[in-house]
Each structure stands twice: as structure tokens, then as C-alpha cells.
Image (spheres, grey):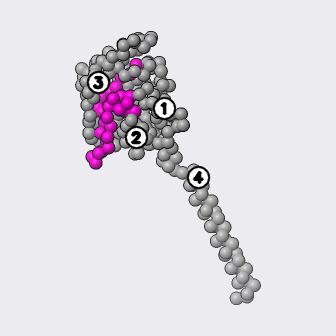
Amino acid sequence: MNKTIFYTLLAAFLASGLLASVMGYRVIAGLRESGSASERDLEYQKLPADAPTDLTTDFTLIERSGKPVRWSDLEGQVRVTNFFFASCPGTCLSQNRNVQNIQQSYAGKSVVFLSITCDPDNDDPQRLREYADRLHADHRQWLFLTGRFSYIEQLAKEMFDVGLARTKEGPTHSERLIVADKWGHVRGYFEWNNHAKMTQLRQLVDKLLLETEPPADVAQQDSSPPAEVQP
């Protein structure tokens, strides 16, 4: 082969290899920069700079939409809160089916429902969106919240007076629905699988909807120790 042709072909080969390498690098760099949806969603565990640290009165968590939700932003609405995790094999789903029935009966009223995961490492916003879709949850009135476990564990204890834990068998959490008034004061705990208690919950919600100012003496309607449930 003519040396000139040989060196021409060699130069062309090397140039094409270099171009491929550059293009490959740009593609990889672009993927790293944009990240997958789940990788971007890891931001949900980073607390906003202005996230409350006094969790006896306020907190900030990330909703399934990816937007932050602050407890104090819900002022003016009665609040019904429960803890769950998306991979729970049955109990949590049954609990949230019950919440679904209650939420639908208060559709369009000043009542907001908050379902807070106790397995945030797995329950990112995308997974909560999928879970909420299974329940046809109204995004305007039923919020699904996630964040950092230590933060959720602390607010569960300090604001709601319930315990969360991680065990080898899976997360443990309270099985009660927690009702707070329009000003964020906890007013009652109710077992979701007890028909009489659910009737009492509705009666309390109806009462709280009529309140126009916080009562001077905020008393819990059901002050017995919160029950815990394991998967």
C-alpha cells in the first residue's frame, strides 16, 4: 500500500475515534448532569434552608408533586394525618382505603389529608405519585409526603406524639388517624379500623369545621396512647 494512502487512512481512523470519544463523553456528561428521574428526586431528602426546626409547631416535607409543603401553610383547614409506607403488604393500603372514603365524603370542604411515609428512602415522590394514583387521590385535598427519615421520625414524636422505627422486618408506625384543627393543634387520635372511632373522627372534623377561632383550652378528644402496627 502506498505510504501516503496508508497515513491518510490512519489519520482518518484516529480522527473518527477521537470524535467518537468526544461525542461519547458529551453524552455521558449530559446524562450525569440531567440524571434520571429517580436520581433528581433524591433532592426531596434535602431540607429547604427555611425548613422549621421547632417540630412541635411546624414542619416542611416534600409532596408527591415534588413541591415542598409546610404545615403552617395549611392554616384554615382541618387536617387528618396518617403514617404509612408504600411497600406495606396490606395494612397500610387498607388504612389508606379508609382515608380515601373519608376524604371523598369531605370533597370540596376545608379538610386536607396528609399521608406521611415512614420509609422515605424508598418512597420518593415518583413512587408516591404511583401509589396515590392507585387510590385516585385528589391532589388538591390529599397530600402524600416524604423527606428525610430522621426529620420525619422527629416530627412524628414532637408534633404528633407517635413513634416510628426501622426494624429488620420493616418500618413500624402508628395505626391511628390524627386530627388537627385549622390552627394546627392536634385534637384527637382515632383507630382507622374501628367503626365507632371513625364515626367519632367525622364528628370531630365536623365540629372543627365550624370553629372560627382557636379554643382557649385545646383538649384531645382521644388521649389514650397511640397504637403501633408492624407490617
Callout 2 environment at 10 Å: few (<14), some (14 to 19), or many (20+)?
A: few
Q: Earlier in the sequence, mark 2 or mark 1?
A: 1
Is residue 164 in the magenta section?
yes
Residue type of the residue flagged with mark 1: Pro
Q: Residue at x 60, y 57 (%)?
A: 29
- Marks 2/1: CA distance? 14 Å
SS class, disc 1: loop
Which label lies toward us, 3 or 2?
A: 2
Q: Which of the two labelled residues, at mark 3 and mark 1, occupies the earlier sequence position?
A: 1
- Evaluate whether residue 51 shows in this view: yes
**Disc 4/disc 3 C-alpha distance (Å):** 46 Å
- Residue 96: x and y, percent? 34, 32
Q: Position of residue 148 (x, y in %)?
A: 43, 41
Say if mark 4 contacts mark 3, CB within 8 Å: no
Residue sticking out furthest to the front: 54
Residue with the mark numbered 1? 52
Name the image quarter holding the N terminus.
bottom right
Marks 3 and 1, how far apart at CA: 27 Å
Q: Amino acid at mark 4?
A: Glu
Q: Which mark is residue 190?
A: 3
Write down the residue under mark 2. 150
